[in-house]
Image (cartoon, helix red, strand yellow):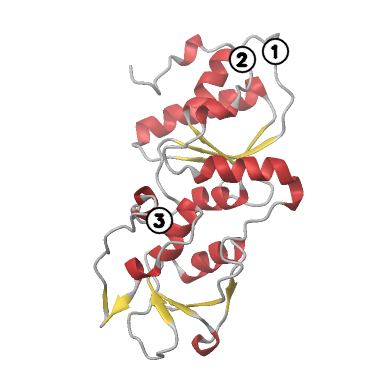
Amino acid sequence: MNKHEYNINTIKTNKYVHITSVNYTIIIMYYYDERQFISFRAYERLAIDTLGGLQLNHCVNDDTTHVVSYEPRRTLNLLRGLIRGLWILDYKWILDSLKAGYWLNEEDYELRVFSRAIEICRTERQAFGSTYKCELFADLGTFYISSRCGPISKENLKELIELCGGKVVEHRKRARYILGDPHKTLEDKVYVTPFWVLDSITHMQVMRQQKYAYVTNNVVKPQPPDPQINPETLVSTPPVVSG
């Protein structure tokens, strides 16, 4: 039995068990086969019926409080949750809460292995409350997103940039940064791949542009890390996947 396997018959369902009064809007992301999917959906239904206060949704929005993931993969929903400073948790939180009979403390299940920024953004949101807003790109100037943009769609990339305080324009001549277009036609612009934005969000730190720049229609080879910069923040993470 691995760390995510439980016998559903052993989970507490006594109606007299203590239930914490909460109102969660939660996103759950899956990365496993159909049989596992059916099994974990059973746990979710049991969590809703037994512990209460849980509302499932498919897309992170301003009402979402928790993002729960089976594994620490970079997805649109995870990045949306990170930017908003939401709880981003391992799926084991649901399983262990069911065994305990109430929602457990989230801090023990936070997906810090994905990025240390998860805890930083969450604590800032807790400190500032409804006034919290990510301003990662607020002072960088304007962005133009090419229709050639990939692996993320132009619309989704625009959403992420704006959530981080950035401004996206429709005409490249008005932009400082050109995203997703390897053909340099304007010398005064910075041409970078979309991974510059995605990696910057993942680490909540504006990454050095040289690693993501286009040169003669190709991406330049990564430069050696600056010894004054934590090398962990320069590691490119896997492509964004839907969900």
Percent of width and height locating residue 2: 34, 20
Residue drawn where x is 46% and y is 29% of the image:
40
Marks 3 and 2: which is nearer the front?
3
Disc number at residue 101?
Answer: 2
Hey, what amino acid is under mark 2? Gly
* Depth order, front residue of 215/183: 215
From the image, tell me which residue sits under label 1. 18
Q: Residue shown at 44%/51% (left/top)?
A: 75
Q: Is residue 174 above or below residue 119?
A: below
Q: In this view of the protein, which residue sits in the foreground, 193 or 242?
A: 193
| Residue drawn at 43 percent across, 61 percent down | 207
- Quarter-wise, where is residue 21 in the image? top right
Decide: few, some or many residues near mark 1? Use Cα within 10 Å; few <14, some 14-19, many ≥20.
few
Point out the tag, 2 or 1, that comes first from the N-terminus.
Answer: 1
Residue 57 seen from this side: no
Cα separation, mark 3 vs mark 2, equals 35 Å
Q: Secondary structure at mark 2?
A: loop
User: x, y (%) of residue 180?
Assistant: 39, 74
Mark 3, Cα crowd under 10 Å, few <14 / some 14-19 / many 20+, is: some
Q: Are marks 2 and 1 in contact (CB under 8 Å)?
A: yes
Mark 3 = which residue? Answer: 240
Count of residue discs? 3
Residue 48 position within the rendered picture, expressed as x and y whole percent measured from the top left = 62, 27
Q: Amino acid at mark 3?
A: Val
